[in-house]
Image (tube, rainbow, N blue to C red):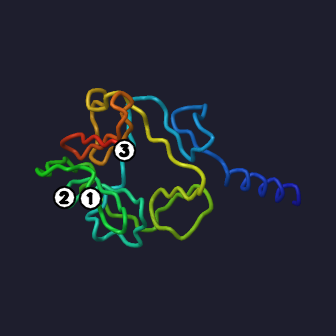
Amino acid sequence: MKKSLLSTFILVYSCSFSQVAIGKTVLESASSSIEFGTENRGLVLPWVTSASVVSGVVNGTMIFDLNDKKVKVYESNAWKDLSINSDGTADTTLQDGLVEETAAKVSFGTVTSTPGILVLEDTNRAMILPKVADPHLNIVSPTPGMIVYDTTKKMLAVFNGAVWTFWKAS
């Protein structure tokens, strides 16, 4: 009994400080919480009915707002648009009729009460986005709310369901 309890404790403790690699076996950086493989795929942000209904929002939260078909980030206590698309023509049929699960949460790092679906709570690590060369050419069927790092343009690429938007750090 003591051995199994000790083994369980050691396993849980070692996992609480681990890194996650998705689609790859070797991590690129010791400073990452999550890294993604090199296939032409992106990270799809959570779809919400409207940014205004997201509760307990903290700076750094990213969503795809179904109300106006835009990718948004919560920064300086306000929602900022990362899509810049005025026509709002995203195909959201994949999510039509789904019910939002407000209690769903996966945390990496020291777990806190910060709300969210995927919460990276490490204070000294970051997420490395999926890297794709020319995602507008190489991701065959992008999904609204998809986000990747374009290795050719060296920019953040965001797909809102109609167009790709590219962002460069200033």
Judging by the rendered image, the residue that carries numbered circle 1 is 65
Q: Identity of the amino acid at label 2?
A: Asp
Q: Identity of the amino acid at label 1?
A: Asp
Q: In the displayed structure, would residue 13 be above or below residue 42?
A: below
**In the image, residue 11 lies at what x, y percent?**
74, 51
**Mark number, residue 135:** none
Q: CA distance from mark 2 to mark 3?
A: 25 Å
Element under label 3?
Answer: loop
In the foreground, 36 or 141: 36
**Badge 3 or badge 1: first in the primary sequence:** 1
Element under label 1?
Answer: strand
Instruction: Look at discs 2 and 3 and give the one toward the viewer.
Output: 3
In the foreground, 72 or 90: 72
Cβ–Cβ under 8 Å for marks 2 and 1: yes
For image coordinates 37% across by 33% down, the residue present is: 154
The residue sitting at the left extreme is 87
For image coordinates 39% across by 43% down, the residue present is: 43
Judging by the rendered image, the residue that carries numbered circle 2 is 68
Give the left or right position of residue 4, taking residue 36 as reference: right
For image coordinates 66% across by 48% down, the residue present is: 18
Q: Which quadrant of the figure has residue 50?
A: bottom left
**Badge 2 or badge 3: first in the primary sequence:** 2
**Mark number, residue 169:** 3
Q: CA distance from mark 2 to mark 1?
A: 6 Å
Element under label 2?
Answer: loop
In the foreground, 133 or 155: 155
Q: CA distance from mark 3 to mark 1?
A: 23 Å
Q: In the displayed structure, would residue 8 be above or below residue 128?
A: below
